[in-house]
């Protein structure tokens, strides 16, 4: 198990793990996930989404390849359902899909240069300004490691099942410029995602808010606009240097004047998520 990095920050990343083997493993999965799977190689990680035909998120996905096998990390508890869904699209390809039964640990570090025992695969990963290294190691996850949700929230990223879910599309989860490749070929749900991008505005969007230390215990609290109307709701709360980082689903109309947002009377500032394609 990895214990540290040059930056000294290693986080446990709860995931169910699928394994894909065969010569067509990348090209097959590339036609299903939103990210550029064909760009994943030994030493290179990726982050993407599995979507429905209607463009809704089934799970977010972390990817690693060790040169002969592609490891797919999906949201915890979703492994069996995702495998069943993907199996429907496995026809004539030279690929085999299975769910890992042995204990495995997904780890993510802010930085690189970590040492780990029995690392199955590892790769660099850039997410929303976060330069990190992703690993898959043998063995059960260590309860001593902090949850990666802290690191992701620091960079404006949410957790599936907490901050976004199967009712959201990539734009609503603020993952349209993070987990979606706009240069690759077709993938499941692509037409709907592209139509949404051309339309622009969505009803709501996941954003990261910065507030004071007093907001450290406001989970599920409403976010209000200047006129007192409800602009959205907090989905998760995280500690931040000198204050609090909150992830919240906010209506697009409220994001047109984000400086006026407040929680329990305390003004909060939008740090991530108010993208230019909202209008």
Image (cartoon, rainbow, N blue to C red):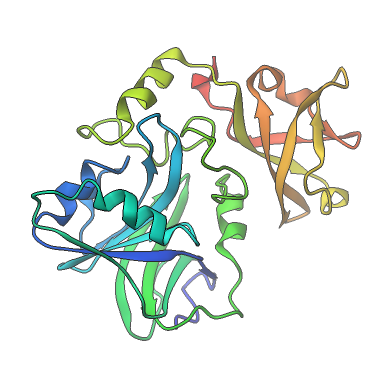
Q: Is residue 89 left or right of residue 22?
A: right
Q: Is residue 240 left or right of residue 199?
A: right
**What is the quadrant of the C terminus in the image?**
top right
Residue positioned 63% across, 21% down in the render:
252
Where is residue 85 drawn, in percent x and y? 33, 49
Q: Is residue 188 left or right of residue 209?
A: left
Residue positioned 22% across, 49% down in the render:
29
Q: Nearer the viewer, residue 190 or 148?
A: 190
Determine whether 188 is above or below 140 in the image.
above
Where is residue 258 drawn, in percent x and y? 71, 24
Determine whether 67 is above or below 116 in the image.
above
Where is residue 55 drawn, in percent x and y? 40, 31
Residue positioned 49% across, 20% down in the render:
277
Residue lying farthest bottom?
Answer: 117
Where is residue 231 drawn, in percent x and y? 75, 26
User: Which of the 4 quarters of the picture holds residue 224?
Assistant: top right
User: Which of the 4 quarters of the picture holds residue 249?
Assistant: top right
**What is the quadrant of the N terminus in the image?**
bottom left
Counting the numbered discs, the total is 0
């Amino acid at each position: 198990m990895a214990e540290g990095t040059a930056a000294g920050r290693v986080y446990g990343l709860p995931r169910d793990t699928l394994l894909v083997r065969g010569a067509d493993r990348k090209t097959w999965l590339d036609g299903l996930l939103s990210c550029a799977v064909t760009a994943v190689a030994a030493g290179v990680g990726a982050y993407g989404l599995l979507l429905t035909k209607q463009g809704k998120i089934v799970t977010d996905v972390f990817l690693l390849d060790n040169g002969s096998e592609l490891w797919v990390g999906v949201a915890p508890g979703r492994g069996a359902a995702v495998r069943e869904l993907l199996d429907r699209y496995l026809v004539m390809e030279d690929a085999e899909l299975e769910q890992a039964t042995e204990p495995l640990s997904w780890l993510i570090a802010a930085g690189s240069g970590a040492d780990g025992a029995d690392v199955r695969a590892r790769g660099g990963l850039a997410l929303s300004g976060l330069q990190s290294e992703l690993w898959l190691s043998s063995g059960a996850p260590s309860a001593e490691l902090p949850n990666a949700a802290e690191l992701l929230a620091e960079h404006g990223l949410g957790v599936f099942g907490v901050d976004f879910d199967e009712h959201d599309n990539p734009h609503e989860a603020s993952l349209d410029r993070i987990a979606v490749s706009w240069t690759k070929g077709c993938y499941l749900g692509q037409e709907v995602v592209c139509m949404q991008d051309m339309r622009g505005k969505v009803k709501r969007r996941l954003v990261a808010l910065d507030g004071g230390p007093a907001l450290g215990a406001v989970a599920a609290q409403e976010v209000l606009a200047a006129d007192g109307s409800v602009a959205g709701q907090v989905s998760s709360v995280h500690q931040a240097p000198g204050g609090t980082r909150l992830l919240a689903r906010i209506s697009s109309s409220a994001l047109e004047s984000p400086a006026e947002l407040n929680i329990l009377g305390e003004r909060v500032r939008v740090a991530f998520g108010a993208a230019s394609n909202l209008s």
